[in-house]
Amino acid sequence: MKILALDPGTVTGVAYARAGHMPYLDTWRLPEGQGAEVGAFFAEFERLLTSAIIEGQPDILVFEAPFVGPKLLSNMNACRRVIGLPCVIELIAHKMKLEVAECNLMTVRSHFVGKGRCDKHETIAACRRAGVTPADDHQADAFACFWWTVACQAPEQLAFYDPLQVAARRAEMAAQA
């Protein structure tokens, strides 16, 4: 099963791989701006996502559910983007006949990190224990969603990301060097 996992936002984290393999991690930086630039924002996201799907041919597209808090509601353009990104994801998945799933980051983190409310450093540390080195917290959240999808849909592959398995692979590579 090939999984494309996203932490959608102005800075979007991406994790892609077949379950039981090391993921490719990326960060997409979308154009910022006000008013009319919202169209350019969504157009760039659509271009990046469509290219990633065509290139990677995932079996499932998974994304972090948006969080709309009181601070976000005070900025309509920001709110439009946060709510709009999942709509674009769902639309593209539908057009490309791709399975799509939304995951709640608190649920994901409670299993991946050990607690739902944690800071970005704790998520990055959990990624490192799983053998993955994210460049930023967006990639870390994308990998957490990737990991959650493996846990739910391909649990037999989850051992690959177990810290003991990771340590054994690292020791084996060091011995070969």
Image: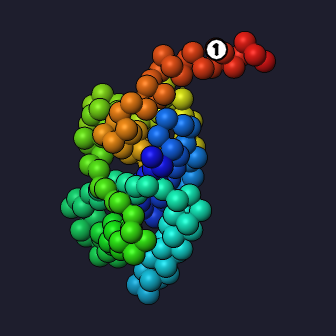
Residue 175 visible in the current orientation: yes
- The x, y position of residue 24, in whole percent, is 58, 46
Q: What residue is drawn where x is 71% and y is 16%?
A: 174
Residue 15 visible in the current orientation: no
- The x, y position of residue 89, in whole percent, is 38, 67
Q: What residue is drawn where x is 54% and y is 74%?
A: 47
**Which one is nearer the viewer's eye here, 142 or 61?**
61
Question: Quadrant of the rendered structure where residue 94 is?
Answer: bottom left
| Rendered position, 17 above or below 102 | above
Relative to 112, 136 lies left or right: right
- The x, y position of residue 153, in whole percent, is 33, 42
Q: Which residue is mark 1?
A: 171
Q: Secondary structure at mark 1?
A: helix
Q: Residues within 10 Å of mark 1 (few under 14, many from 20)?
A: few
Residue at the right extreme? 177
Relative to 42, 167 lies left or right: right
Rendering colour mode: rainbow
> Count of labels shown?
1
Q: Amino acid at mark 1?
A: Ala
Q: What residue is drawn where x is 23% and y is 59%?
A: 69
| Rendered position, 173 above or below 137 | above
Q: Quadrant of the C terminus?
A: top right
**Which one is nearer the viewer's eye here, 66 or 6?**
6
Question: Quadrant of the rendered structure where residue 75 is?
Answer: bottom left
| Rendered position, 87 above or below 169 | below
**Which one is nearer the viewer's eye here, 80 or 164?**
164
Residue at the bottom extreme? 36
- The x, y position of residue 37, in whole percent, is 47, 82
Relative to 57, 104 lies left or right: left
